Image (cartoon, rainbow, N blue to C red):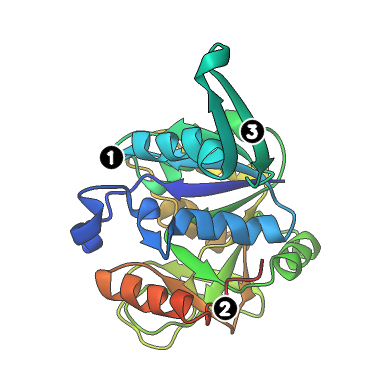
Amino acid sequence: MKVVILAGGLGTRISEESYLKPKPMIPIGEQPILWHIMKYYSHFGFHDFVICCGYKGHIIKEYFADYYLHRSDVTFDFSAGNRMTVHENVAEPWRVTLVDTGLNTQTGGRVKRVQKYIGDEAFLLTYGDGVSDVDLNALLEQHRRSGKVVTLTGVQPGGRFGVLDLEGQTVTGFREKAKEDGGWINGGFMVMEPEVFDYLSEDESCILEREPMERLARGGRLGIYKHGGFWQCMDTQRDKIWLEERWEKRNAPWRVW
């Protein structure tokens, strides 16, 4: 099963870092938060990634182009025809497809534009700026039992995000960026059936969390997996500092590998 990661936004709320690099490449410790997310999925056996690039996407491509070399012991023998020998490969068992989905494209348009790399199969989707200790196996099992087109992971971080109206494990309303406190919000870590592409457009104005999610909710096709554990997005510089402190103190709940 492929994992699609949205990594193309401008990251304007953390412009102290994002003016130099795309938000998913902002480091937590020595590695970008994108690496942390991928390591987490890989722990559960998901190694095939499709990265939706946009703003400064070349930096993400360069990172993975050099990843194998930077993570291995090598000898460069210039006396033998400039031969390079890799002695120990400590890179990950990943397959990474990097797709330029446009500079200003919204989330729904980005997902639609990678359809050809996913095919007619269910896939996982998350944002490139959030970490969690959600049980991906339990999430996937609930999704398969539910018969929903999309199951998202619901978390309760507070009132600065939008809220979801619920009836049991079904989302009946999706209200992004509302002001209510204490509700369940979309924390990413989603499972999607290929039918979701029927709700999306390649138009750069297509926002996944607006009309497509609202239509799915109205039709009873949008499910929620309620996660009461750790979840944190890196929305601001303050969030980055907090995550780094957890990582440096070895108190990072997403570090399961």
Disc 3 or disc 2, which is closer to the eye? 3
Residue 104 located left or right of residue 53: left
Q: Earlier in the sequence, mark 3 or mark 1?
A: 3
Q: Position of residue 92 (x, y in %)?
A: 65, 47
Of circles 3 and 1, which is in front? 3
Q: Nearer the viewer, residue 206 or 138?
A: 138
Q: Are marks 3 and 1 in contact (CB under 8 Å)?
A: no
Badge 2 or badge 1: first in the primary sequence: 1
Residue 223 image offset from top left, x and y in percent: 63, 66
Residue 256, image quadrant = bottom right
* Residue pictured at 37% horizontal, 44% vertical: 8
- The spot of residue 89 in percent (x, y) is 66, 42
- Residue to which mark 1 is pinned: 104
Q: Which residue is mark 2?
A: 253
Query: Can you tell which mark lies on residue 86?
Result: 3
Mark 3 and mark 1: Cα distance apart in space: 40 Å
